[in-house]
Image (tube, rainbow, N blue to C red):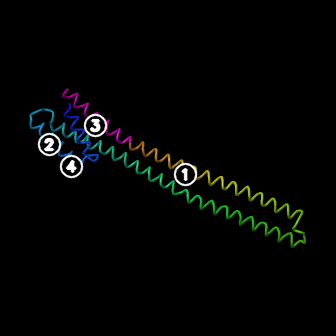
Amino acid sequence: MQMAIGLLTTGLKAVTGGGAAATTTAATAAGGAAASGGGFFSLSNLMQGAATLLAATSQINAGNADAERYELAAIDAEREQPLETLQGIQRRSSIKAELAESIGDMDTAYAASGVDLSFGTPGQARTRAYREADYALTADNSTQQTRQARLTERSASYRRMGQRAKRRGYTNALVTGLSYGGQLAGRFG
């Protein structure tokens, strides 16, 4: 049983970065144990062990791929924030341009009809236009801040999901290895 766990651990180290030395050690140990005459290393056990090792590797790689995908989504959400700032500036500039054009049109219309622009109805209309533009600018600024906060939250959420995906891959690989170890222990224990 200790030999099986040692081989499984060595195999996982080889897959996850232990390198060629760990693989060579595992192969040497497997060959030595098979040569010693133990019935532990039958062809079916070795094939099942290799399949288990490949399954564990695949689960780790899948977890890492999911984590990378979530990290890229987080980076994309972060990169949308400056774009949102630029769009907010453009919207507010458009509101200010519309205000200026509206006041100009009102002043032209009142002046053409011979009304004094310094007081009365033209002054009230101008004050109302400024107030409406101020409301629109404030609302747009709040909208921009809300959108940027959502992008920040989305980025953080993607990063958390990436960490969970990576942990899930390693956990699944561990469970697969332990399941195989349990099967071997049941056969030879």
The mark that comes first in sequence, 1 or 4, is: 4
77 left or right of 187 in image: right
The mark that comes first in sequence, 3 or 1, is: 1
Q: Residue at x 32, y 35 (%)?
A: 175
**Magenta stretch contains residue 39:** no
Q: Secondary structure at mark 2?
A: helix
Give the residue type at disc 3: Gly
Whole-angstrom CA distance, mark 2 to mark 4, is 12 Å
Q: Residue at x 51, y 54 (%)?
A: 78
Structural crowding at the residue carrying mark 3, measured as other residues with C-alpha within 10 Å and reported as few (<14), some (14–19) or many (≥20): many
Whole-angstrom CA distance, mark 1 to mark 4, is 44 Å
**Magenta stretch contains residue 171:** yes
**Where is mark 2, residue-wise?**
28
CB contact under 8 Å: marks 2 and 3: no
Q: Secondary structure at mark 4?
A: helix
Quarter occupied by residue 181: top left
**Where is mark 3, residue-wise?**
177
The mark that comes first in sequence, 2 or 4, is: 4
Nearer the observer, disc 3 or disc 1?
1
Q: Which numbered disc covers residue 151?
A: 1
Report the front residue among 48 and 171: 171
**Where is mark 4, residue-wise?**
20
CB contact under 8 Å: marks 1 and 2: no
